[in-house]
Amino acid sequence: MSGAGPQRSTFLLSCLCFGFAFLYIPILLMIVYSFNHSKLLPVWGGFSFRWYVTLFNSPDVWAATVLSLKIALINATVATFFGTLAGLALARFTRFPGRTLFTGMISAPLVMPEVITGLSLLLLFITLQQLIGWPGNRGMSTITIAHITFSMAYIAIIIQSRLANSDLSLEEAALDLGAKPFRVMADITLPLLAPGMMAGWLLAFTLSLDDLVIASFVAGPGSTTLPMLIYSRIRLGLKPDINALATLLVLAVAIGVLIAGWILIRNQRLRKP
Amino acid sequence: MFVPFRALMQQHWKAIVVLIPFLWLLVFFLTPFFIVVKISVAESLIASPPFSRLLDWSNGWPPTIAINLENYAYLWEDSLYIKTYLSSLKIASISTLLCLLIGYPMAYAIVRTPGTGKFVLLLLVMLPFWTSFLLRVYAWMGLLADQGTINDILIWLGLVDKPVRLLYSHFAVYVGIVYTYLPFMILPLYAIMERLDHSLNEAAADLGAKPVSAFFTVTLPLTMPGILAGCLLVFIPATGEFVIPDLLGGGNVLMIGKILSSEFNANHDWPVASAVAVALLLVLMVPMLFYHRIQSMDVNR
Amino acid sequence: MTEQPFIKVRGLTRTFGNFTAVDNIDLDINRGELFVLLGGSGCGKTTLLRMLAGFETPDAGSIEIDGADMAQTPPYSRPVNMMFQSYALFPHMSVEKNVAYGLKRDGVDRAQIKLRVGEMLQMVEMQDFAKRKPHQLSGGQRQRVALARSLIKKPKVLLLDEPLGALDKRLREQTQFELMELQDKLGTTFVVVTHDQEEAMTLATRIAVMEGGRFMQIGTPAEVYETPATKFVANFVGSVNMIDGVVTSCQPGLVDVKTKQGAVTLQAQSRDEHAVGSEVSIAVRPEKIIIQKTRPETEPETPNVLHGTVKELAYLGRLSTLRVETDAGFIVEVTSPNTTRHSDGKHPFEWDDEVYISFPAASAVVLIA
């Protein structure tokens, strides 16, 4: 019996090591090969920044990056606004006409296969174009609309669960002290939701930057987002400049997540008296 | 301008809060589905748009309604589609199981890690999730290719003398799906294990349960909601997956997302593509509703 | 009671689905009272408090505060303020901002707010913590801030939901007296909800004991303790010996009861008439029973003198609790103050000692069912 404890933790530890190796080795190798001088990717031809230079000199990569960032920014901001409203409605208004439909429409996008979302939105845009002449051509605006639609669902769920876990008596205390309901929302509810909204904004930003399938459906000719560009290149095989791009992206995300995580851990320590 | 806005907000803010997201979803989420359903019962035409109208106004009032179920009949008759649906479900199920087998002990080990280490490990699980999905799939192309790292190692070890076909196979698709969806399995498991009272395990041990039986009688049943949520979060999107079979499976792996995309983009057969989408949605309806129920149970708790 | 009651509740009812939380309640509370609602969890005390604050809408009945009907008044317009069980301090605002919040909503001008917040923080001795955030305060400090915040608007009634529940025992006792002092100084009507009977006894001018959404008894702490109206009240407030029996005679003021176990006759004072043969219980508080080694020198037939043996003994320091098994068979709990110190370490009574216990008829109460 005495051996059971350590034995079990060895098992868990090896699971952990295997799991993290599985998660990280592919990414690390991808990074290593980005510094490979050889054009034939799997063959090591010495250390070089060659592919980074190629990357920085390709205007289509720049254009796609700028487009993707623009879409991600607008999407995150609008989706956070809509999603927060939706989360508020779900958590605080227990009865209104169409609530069941509303809940369904909020939770469905989370599990909807991307191909279906993409196809249905494209068909909507085409139908709208025939009916009212808008959208004239598909591109940034249609991609942004599509991204907002699925991002807001994620944010609504974050906000709803935050509100469900929050202390209702805070809002009652504000009412009791003379604040009218709208005031309570502005003074108490929204400030308490700020961290959730921040998290939601970041999530929406990443989801948008990451989306390939939906964007491919609703984008028109001439508007290529970064994932679409990457996809069109790697479909035909390994491309060393994509390794360089991947390395830069992973680096940016890692730095961002590490900073966020550090702030989170520090706050947690501060909160504990 | 400002004063009436304020008055409006004071009086009708509740309605406004609901209506803004509600209308958006109505237009951009619900309506598109009806359009898909509508087109799925249209006839394929060589025209722009390439399908017949549901309501034919050419004979004046009342319009004739043309519902064409041939697209669905076609899905049923052409064995390719049935085979593809079954293959998608099989690939998604096996991948889900693999995710659970890898993810559960990982989540358990993370929860058991003392102090700040827990957050660091959780962050490490999340980190790949925040990096590009596409690039993570691409990373595996580099590993699995004929001249890829894995084959290099195998040859160097002398286990094989010429490259094994790893890329463009079912194996590659499993690896890709498990790799990209693993965080979706770990996070809900972590969330539920975190809330689990460790003294329950101690109580079981105190009452004579060995670690293994304590796990099967206490921990496993109590983490069931997390297991279900995690499995559905992997299974549902994996079924409709398009990028992974396309990049890692090549022409050898049949998945419905690929068929849908090629039906639409290559064959320009919108009605059949729509019918494929509707059928996929019907197949996934049960797990989706199930997930919705777990989710709302969790929020109410 | 010539004065109109300050809070007047009539026929108040609130149900949640099948559960009736508050069941057709009438209640009068006078100006300046410190009124305590006492009961176990789920007895309806918190629901009643929340209806006074306006957070719950009654299904039936009316609430009047200082002559004004509250039916149509939302919580933010009521002349009452509440101190929440969790304190509900706004975590994103400093102590100062928390306390000022109510005045700001009333549109009081800034200088005035500053002045009154300063005074209020002085009163609860929190002036040095004005800039702190709630999570930087101790439990006792949070309680003071919550109190200051709920008093700053000078409400006609202050509602307190388990005001001392989150504090540890020592701090709770100290805070009880501060709360009473404060109430005395301000003259505000306090309505307190608590499940702690000792706290209720200490604080209250009057106590209402609640059970199942109704009042079991309303009275001063002494009335509730000394002359409980029902068995529930007698049990809930303090500990009590409950001896079941049948009425054998009922002279004016005095009732004779033959106990079910052992058929001994006990006598108790009662204001009410009890029919001979009716089933009642005699309730005696443990501290009202005299315990002696020798038989008290009274007439041999005097009732309420019982012989027995000490079965259990708990030394609690200030006093000891003994459980005596009487010859009649029932067990009686007795407390005996440890007034003298026994240097040999022995207690005046030990296990299996033969003792006589007695109590005057005036110390016992007759309770029906």
Image: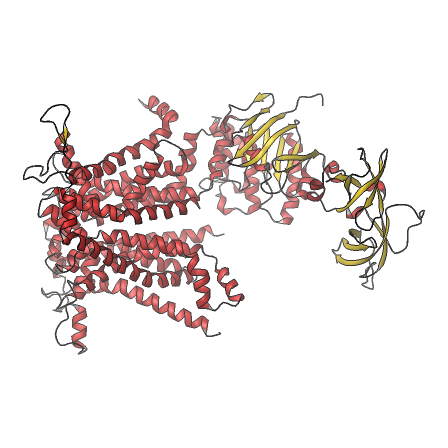
At 85% from the left edge and 43% from the top edge, which residue is drawn?
C360
Q: In which image quadrant can residue C92 be found?
A: top left
Residue at screen point 17% across, 43% down: B274
**Residue B36 sits in quarter:** top left
Is residue C58 shown above or below A194? above
* B236 displayed left or right of C45: left
**x, y (%) of residue C364?**
81, 42
Report how many numbered discs are placed on residues in the image: 0
**Image x and y of residue C267, in percent:** 85, 42
Image side of residue C166 versus residue A151, left or right: right
Give the quadrant of residue A117. top left
Residue with the most extreme left position: B46
Image position of A150 (left or right of C250) = left
Q: Nearer the viewer, residue B215 or B119?
A: B215
The percent position of residue C270, horizontal first and vertical second, equals 81, 36
Say if residue A69 shows up in the picture: no
Please, which residue is most extreme toward the bottom here?
Answer: B158
In this view of the protein, which residue sits in the foreground, C206 or A114?
A114
Residue C151: image location, x then y, percent = 57, 33
Report the quarter where the N terminus of chain B lies. top left
In the rendered view, would you say C157 is above or below C248? Answer: above
